[in-house]
Image (tube, rainbow, N blue to C red):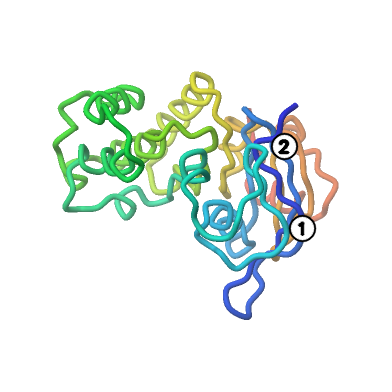
């Protein structure tokens, strides 16, 4: 099976502080993979390094068969996009939804912007009435749909999802998770998701890596998660604290 993301001995630092230690993963194209663990375990830092937002790292990052360099490059941006935790904070408050969705197309010189914006809104379940509204005129769930649409504007193959439902209430969380599942199926996307919510992992993901203190302590399948079948003591502790992860 072809790999979408390969990490080899990835250690990431901010200044003198090393956040992650020797992270190694191989995530297949079309797979949905989760990084779980307590706050401060380094989960989001891994996403930021893959996205080019944490440039101080050693090891190897490979995306869709190409070795990633430090910093941000256009090829990586087109193929790998990130959806952030806070949909309101990640959208410019003074730009319309049309402007937000058109911006990545303009940066990369993509034509047919109006048609692409309309198609993206439709793909995430928003009609054209939302196109010229501002973020504050949308609900939290609608803003997250816009954030997902923006991530899809350049037709990437990989989405990095940083706690994409944690800022939403429970009913809206379910809607966004169903949307993500449908988009993955329709567009053959690969997901790498950070979350602390094990039921979300059980619903959306094929496999997960449990992180603690910047290291991976266990990699397990979704079936192992549903059964609570972990080998590492910390993984079992995390599972027990969550109340289990029903299918």
Depth check, front residue: 97 or 88:
97
Residue 68 picture location, percent across and down: 62, 51
Quarter of the image where the N terminus is located: top right
Residue that carries the numbered disc 1 in the rendered image = 9
Residue that carries the numbered disc 2 in the rendered image = 225
Q: Residue at x 35, y 27 (%)?
A: 124
Q: Residue at x 64, y 48 (%)?
A: 35
Considering the numbered disc 1 on the image, is that residue within a helix, a strand or a loop? strand
The outermost residue toward the bottom is: 16
Left or right: residue 67 compared with residue 166: right
Q: Where 173 sits versus 196, above or below? A: above
The outermost residue toward the right is: 231
Left or right: residue 118 compared with residue 6: left
Residue 59 picture location, percent across and down: 73, 60
Q: Residues within 10 Å of mark 1 (few under 14, many from 20)?
A: some
Q: Where 46 sits versus 185, above or below? A: below
Q: Where 104 sits versus 115, above or below? A: below
Q: Residue at x 79, y 49 (%)?
A: 218
Q: Residues within 10 Å of mark 2 (few under 14, many from 20)?
A: many
Q: Quadrant of residue 113?
A: top left
Q: Earlier in the sequence, mark 2 or mark 1?
A: 1
Considering the numbered disc 2 on the image, is that residue within a helix, a strand or a loop? helix
Number of the label disc, if any, that sits on residue 29 = none
């Amino acid at each position: 099976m072809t790999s979408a993301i390969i990490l080899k001995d990835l250690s990431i630092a901010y200044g003198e502080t090393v956040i992650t230690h020797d992270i190694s993963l191989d995530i297949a194209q079309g797979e949905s993979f989760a990084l779980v663990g307590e706050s401060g375990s380094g989960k989001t830092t891994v996403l930021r390094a893959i996205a080019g937002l944490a440039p101080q790292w050693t090891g190897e990052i490979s995306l869709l068969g190409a070795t990633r360099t430090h910093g941000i490059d256009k090829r990586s941006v087109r193929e790998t996009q990130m959806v952030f935790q806070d949909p309101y904070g990640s959208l410019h408050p003074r730009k319309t939804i049309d402007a937000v969705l058109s911006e990545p197309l303009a940066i990369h010189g993509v034509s047919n912007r109006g048609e692409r914006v309309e198609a993206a809104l439709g793909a995430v379940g928003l009609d054209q009435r939302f196109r010229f509204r501002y973020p504050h005129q949308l609900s939290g769930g609608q803003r997250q749909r816009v954030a997902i649409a923006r991530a899809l504007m350049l037709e990437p193959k990989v989405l990095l999802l940083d706690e994409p439902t944690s800022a939403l209430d429970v009913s809206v969380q379910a809607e966004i998770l169903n949307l993500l599942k449908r988009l993955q199926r329709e567009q053959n996307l690969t997901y790498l998701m950070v979350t602390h919510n094990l039921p979300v992992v059980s619903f959306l993901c094929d496999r997960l890596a449990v992180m603690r203190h910047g290291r991976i302590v266990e990699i397990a399948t979704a079936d192992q998660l549903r059964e609570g079948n972990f080998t590492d003591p910390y993984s079992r502790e995390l599972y027990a604290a969550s109340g289990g992860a029903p299918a």
